[in-house]
């Protein structure tokens, strides 16, 4: 670079920067200051006179105003699909929880925020659906203040009885006790029924009445040429001493 | 209702309120002048009313509203909403933010109820004195600014005699006019430097020292920049007949369409564009607001009022906003024609209705003056939210190396042009030329493209990343 007024370099992102000699008109600053005031004033006037589009989808907003604020409690941005929100205990069609008190969720929970007390349905329970599943949670309590919203309980549940598909976060409370959710607070949302649910009576023991709606697959199923590495092991020659890397001081 | 209709209604309410206040100011000042003169034998009743109405009411109310405007307008400039959460639980306005107005009340309550804490090692007397010393001179500056023309007010029968008095719409009209402003403005430095020193805090001291040196440096340029205007109008007075504001209401060139007159008035910024820029920059530095806010420097030293809390801090804050209003008033009076309109003045003054009711004409001109003040307040706020802060050495070099020489050159050029043509036409032509040059330069200056994305950079990879604009022989 023999020309001292020209130079080039790379910033952290690898973008090429050219240091062009500044125009005299720019170096006097006054035109640039005036332009800056004009730009700020343009934004000011647009936002002063323009009606703010209350659409919470920031990208889709229209109109003169360039304000992109979402007035939070009144306007809320919808959470994306798959958002892990507040827990719910999934009800059956008859309104009772699907939960069978197996303790899977309480066991896997890394924050230990789930407390379950199991109970048995009575033998003489008139409700046949209840009788076939024997166990139910007498108490099912989640301490939402301890919960780290990892979603492991949802993965662990064998009965699809706990979900985080409420698309809302834990609402605020005035007391800590308010964050300890019990069954009446947790049991909500649309009921869920699977064809494999035990209260669908089977015609025989051979096969279920209803075909499963989802086909269960394993990793690698359907991928041509993929085979699990059966019996693969690392060969170690025991006749020779094992090479040890020595670290010198 | 659409938002722009609401905004226009708000504008109309503000203009109407200003008109009402100025009408009251003229009528009250006229009666006070007439009755005090007749019953006590004392001139100056009008000035007392002006002090109460203009300084205590209008300036303070505008300054208070500016505390909100600073936040709301800056929000609009930065594509935000601004404060709108404080609401008053009354039937009709329950869910209306009222443009953020309740935030002023919450601010006032907060300031007044907070503890005014004083560090144990601070100098008690000076620590308590400093906010007053910072506030009082700024407030007193407005005393010489005329908010309207001088009119004859017919006060009716006083002691059985038909009484007509002359009302000067300024709290005071001394012969030394602008010199008073320079004298009082230089007192404001005591408040800030004493606040910095008496807090017994290194950062506050640093802020106080910065404030002192900045304000003292810029006083030179401040004084020098107005000398051109003093020479052009041959006066240092602002108010009254023959004062700067009144002189600016005359036309340089004018045409008459029927009885309606239209023309180029001899406003200060046309005669003295360089003087205007210099004065604005110097006075802006005196207000210690961004881009000259290194005495405050909230990001590194917090500033000379670091140890203040409660209403003592509030005094510093409100002093800053009062200074904005006062500076706008002085700017309007010296450089933007004071209360005068650029058109239709003679037509308006010749209407028989206004000849009979001069106070109405005065109220209209007073409203024009305050609208100019509000626009200039906006200009100061938009500058604060557009420009980055100057580094400390840049402030000093701007003051001493640019403003001072430019002020001197401006002085000589102005003097020569006034000598050539005492009717100020040459001066105005030269001023228009300067404005035209700045406009042309602004409109033609290149677009800033600093970061070039290398679109065909792969072609240059073999011999390094050479910018495409480089000539080949530089390698």
Image: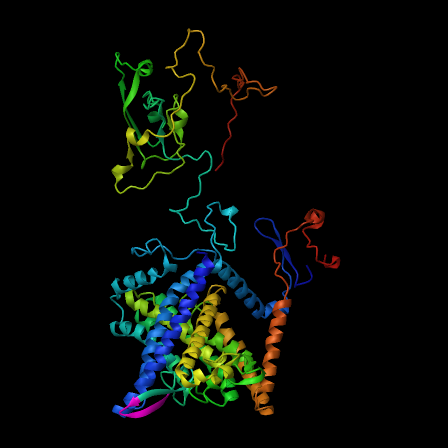
Quick one: A48 or B213, which is closer to the camera? A48
Question: Does the stretch in magenta take in B264?
Answer: no
Q: Is residue A8 above or below residue A58?
A: below
Question: Residue A144: where, in percent of width, then height?
Answer: 32, 35
The N terminus of chain B - image quarter: bottom left
The answer, for residue B299, to whether it is visible in the render is no
Residue at 38% x, 77% y: name it.
B22
Question: Does the stretch in magenta take in B158?
Answer: yes
Which of the 4 image quadrants contains residue B38?
bottom left
Residue at 30% x, 85% y: name it.
B32
- The magenta stretch spans which residues? B157-166
Q: Is residue B334 above or below residue A83?
A: below
Q: Is residue B131 left or right of residue A83?
A: left
Q: Is residue B441 left or right of residue B10?
A: right
Quick one: B158 or A41, which is closer to the camera? B158
Q: Is residue A28 left or right of residue B307?
A: right
Q: Is residue A18 left or right of residue B112?
A: right
Question: Residue B188: where, in percent of width, then height?
Answer: 37, 77
Residue at 35% x, 61% y: name it.
B101
Question: Residue B329: where, in percent of width, then height?
Answer: 43, 77
Question: Residue B30: where, in percent of width, then height?
Answer: 34, 85
Please identify the residue farthest to the right as the structure is shown. B473
Colour pattern: rainbow
Which of the 4 image quadrants contains residue B255?
bottom right
Quick one: A110 or B56, which is closer to the camera? B56
């Amino acid at each position: 670079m023999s020309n001292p007024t020209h130079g080039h370099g790379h910033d952290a992102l690898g973008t090429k920067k050219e240091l062009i000699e500044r125009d005299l008109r720019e170096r006097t600053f006054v035109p640039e200051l005036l332009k800056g005031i004009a730009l700020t004033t343009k934004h000011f006037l647009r936002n002063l006179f323009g009606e703010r589009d209350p659409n919470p989808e920031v990208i889709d907003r229209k109109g003169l105003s360039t304000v992109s604020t979402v007035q939070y409690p009144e306007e809320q941005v919808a959470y994306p699909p798959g958002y892990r929100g507040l827990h719910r205990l999934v009800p059956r069609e008859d309104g009772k929880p699907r939960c069978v008190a197996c303790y899977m969720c309480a066991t896997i929970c890394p924050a230990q925020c789930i407390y379950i007390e199991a109970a048995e349905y009575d033998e003489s329970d008139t409700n046949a659906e209840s009788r076939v599943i024997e166990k139910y949670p007498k108490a099912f309590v989640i301490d939402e203040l301890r919960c780290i919203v990892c979603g492991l309980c949802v993965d662990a549940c064998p009965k699809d009885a706990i979900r985080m598909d409420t698309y809302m976060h834990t609402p605020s409370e005035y007391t800590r006790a308010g964050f300890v959710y019990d069954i009446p607070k947790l049991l909500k949302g649309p009921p869920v029924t699977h064809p494999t649910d035990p209260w669908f009576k089977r015609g025989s023991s051979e096969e279920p009445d209803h075909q499963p709606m989802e086909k269960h697959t394993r990793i690698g199923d359907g991928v041509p040429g993929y085979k699990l590495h059966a019996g693969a092991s690392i060969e170690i020659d025991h006749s020779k001493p094992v090479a040890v890397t020595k670290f010198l001081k | 209702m659409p938002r722009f209709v609401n905004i226009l209604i708000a504008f109309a309410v503000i203009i109407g309120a200003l008109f009402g206040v100025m009408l009251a100011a003229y009528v009250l000042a006229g009666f006070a002048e007439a009755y005090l003169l007749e019953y006590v034998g004392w001139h100056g009743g009008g000035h007392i009313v002006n002090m109460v109405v203009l300084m205590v009411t209008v300036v303070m109310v505008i300054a208070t509203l500016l505390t909100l405007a600073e936040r709301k307008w800056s929000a609009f400039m930065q594509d935000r909403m601004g404060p709108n959460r404080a609401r008053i639980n009354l039937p009709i306005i329950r869910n209306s933010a009222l443009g953020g107005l309740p935030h002023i009340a919450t601010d006032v309550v907060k300031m007044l109820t907070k503890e005014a804490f004083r560090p144990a090692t601070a100098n008690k007397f000076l620590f308590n004195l400093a906010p007053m010393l910072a506030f009082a001179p700024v407030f007193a500056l407005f005393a010489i600014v005329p908010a309207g023309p001088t009119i004859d007010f017919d006060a009716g029968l006083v002691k059985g005699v038909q009484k007509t008095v002359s009302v000067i719409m300024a709290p005071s009209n001394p012969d030394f006019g602008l010199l008073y402003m320079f004298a009082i403005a230089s007192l404001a430095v005591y408040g800030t430097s004493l606040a910095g020193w008496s807090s017994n805090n290194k950062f506050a001291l640093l802020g106080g020292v910065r404030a002192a040196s900045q304000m003292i440096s810029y006083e030179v340029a401040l004084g020098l920049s107005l000398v051109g205007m003093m020479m052009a109008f041959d006066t240092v007075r602002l108010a009254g007949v023959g004062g700067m504001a009144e002189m600016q209401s005359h036309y340089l060139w004018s045409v008459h369409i029927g009885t309606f007159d239209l023309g180029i008035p001899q406003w200060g910024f046309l005669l003295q564009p360089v003087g205007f820029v210099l004065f604005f920059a110097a006075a802006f530095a005196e207000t210690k607001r961004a881009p000259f806010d290194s005495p405050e420097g909230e990001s590194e030293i917090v500033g000379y009022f670091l140890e203040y809390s409660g209403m003592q801090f509030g005094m510093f804050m409100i002093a800053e906003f009062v200074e904005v209003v006062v500076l706008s008033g002085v700017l309007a009076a010296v450089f933007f024609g004071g209360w005068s309109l650029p058109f239709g003045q003679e037509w308006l003054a010749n209407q028989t209705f206004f000849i009979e009711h001069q106070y109405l004409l005065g109220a209209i001109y007073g409203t024009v003056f305050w609208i100019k003040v509000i626009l200039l307040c906006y200009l100061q706020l938009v500058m604060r939210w557009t420009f980055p802060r100057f580094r400390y050495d840049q402030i000093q070099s701007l003051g001493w190396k640019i403003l001072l020489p430019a002020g001197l050159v401006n002085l000589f050029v102005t003097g020569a042009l006034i000598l050539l043509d005492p009717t100020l036409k040459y001066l105005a032509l030269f001023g228009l030329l300067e404005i035209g040059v700045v406009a042309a330069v602004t409109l033609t200056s290149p677009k800033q493209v600093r970061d070039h994305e290398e679109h065909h950079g792969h072609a240059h990879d073999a011999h390094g990343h050479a910018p495409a604009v480089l000539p080949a022989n530089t390698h």
